Image (spheres, rainbow, N blue to C red):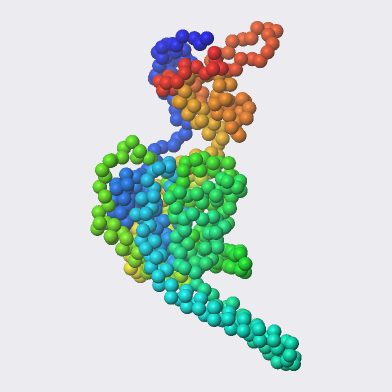
Amino acid sequence: MSEPARSLYSVPGPDTARDGVGDAGWELPLPLSAAQSLPPFPVAALPGWVADQVAAVAEATQTPPDLAGCVALAALSTAAGGRAVVQVRPGWVEPVNLYTVVVMEPSARKSPVFTAMVRPIYALEKALREEAKESIEAARVRRRAAEAASERAEKTAATLDKIADDKDRDAAIADAVEAALSAAAIDIPVEPKLVVDDITPEKVGTVLAEQGGRLAVLSDEGGIFAIIAGRYSGSSNTNVFLKGYTGTQLRVDRTNRPSELVEHPALTLGLTIQPAVIDDLGNTAMLRGSGFLARILYSQPVSLVGHRKARPHPVPDHVADAYNSRLHTIAHTLHGWAEDPARFVFAEHADDLMAELQDDLETRLNPHGGAWAHIGDWGGKAAGQTARLAGLLHTAIHPDNPWEHEITGDTFTHAWELIDYYGAHALHVFDQIGADTDLDTARRLQDWLTRTGPARFSKRDAFKAVRNTTVQKVNDLDTALELLTDHGHIHPQPQPERPKGQRGRAPSPTYWTHPTYRRAGGTEQGEGTR
């Protein structure tokens, strides 16, 4: 039978005589991490016509501007990736394609945001397919005619093989071989494809090769990310995504056809994924070790659920028209720069600011106390990412002829604002990935206390609540319980001395909880203390 409930104001605390804040001498508990509230997306860092669309779509869909902002950058990357490069200074050239991932809960209205932000890309793809129809059909006709000629030549050679002399027979065989090779040499162009959605990593490589090494994976579901991470197969598959980011030569093995080399692949990723996928990444050390996760610009915006308007303002027609027109112009203008990419050169002031950023990054990455020390793999690519962002912003500022202008210091400053935003969110995401399993266990214990609200609990209660692959024995909780104790969330209850000679299992250690947990409701105590 449980003990009668005590008043919150008379619960025995760890030391009621000490100075403190809270009930019965408890001080306010400290957070388990130094994580601060994440910054909002810097919409003002985007060129006017892009910023206007991002703000309007966020209002119309009642979604955080982070989502529309990240998809806008992915759309610009789709338009320019593989068709333009940024020259920071002699010897330092960066492609402009990006990998962006937005972490959002299900049913967050992602689809209408994607539709509004990538519509011009799909419109261009449709137009390119219409333009290519005639040349594709002409190639098919030439191929069929050549194959028919090859068949006739082969039949002739087969007939002469029985009745003609060696000289005529050899000539007929040579004609048949030449006709067969001529037919095989006629390539039928594939339909232009700028964007794919529901696709496997293996198929990405095939389509990338077919499309001349340029492709975007844009998806509001992001299932491909879970596949890359090995969520279903247990092993990660990152090769095409590693090389598609850096532009390193990629060999693609194709069914029933010879392998093909893609000299300078340029892949864009614009995905949304659920938080559970991030949680699972902690179990895939190989994925982070490959460098794939360090190539991604992460965003994890705060949900607006519970604060959304029932009748938001729609996107003004003039805003949507300006966005659609200019993004279409960029994509169409740069589409012809496939073989020799356009080059956007940093102005001297922009290069000076890049040097300042590099010095700043060295401080952040310092292994002895640097703010980004534990995400050195991500931070080590931040300068290059900033150059890519500057290139895309520059393209949006000069949609008709970006190669005729230098990237200015102001443009680079806005790119710096964006990388600071992405850096803060990367810290949060990598923290979630769970390099520290004890800290993750402490957080799960904290969640359990918040849900159940016990006045006290036993160590055995806690073990039952959070048992998983990393917590398989009761003593696996020791460090997590110490963390919660040191941060003032719980306090161990003194254990009574056992009478000499008493046998049997010792009582499970018991802990008091901070009064703030008890206000959350739930039971007064865990079942192990009854």
Camera-side residue of 16 and 395 = 395
Q: Residue at x 35, y 64 (%)?
A: 328
| Quadrant (top left/top right/bottom left/bottom right) for the C terminus | top right
Q: Residue at x 49, y 40 (%)?
A: 276
Q: Is residue 184 above or below residue 23?
A: below
Position in image of residue 492 (x %, y %): 53, 18
Q: Is residue 133 above or below residue 236?
A: below
Position in image of residue 511 (x %, y %): 52, 18
Q: Residue at x 48, y 72 (%)?
A: 339
Residue 324 visible, this angle? yes
Camera-side residue of 248 and 523 = 523
Q: Quadrant of residue 19?
A: top left
Position in image of residue 47 (x %, y %): 31, 57
Q: Is residue 462 above or below residue 17?
A: below
Q: Residue at x 29, y 47 (%)?
A: 59
The mark total stands at 0
Residue 373 visible, this angle? no
Position in image of residue 143 (x %, y %): 54, 78
Q: Is residue 457 above or below residue 134?
A: above
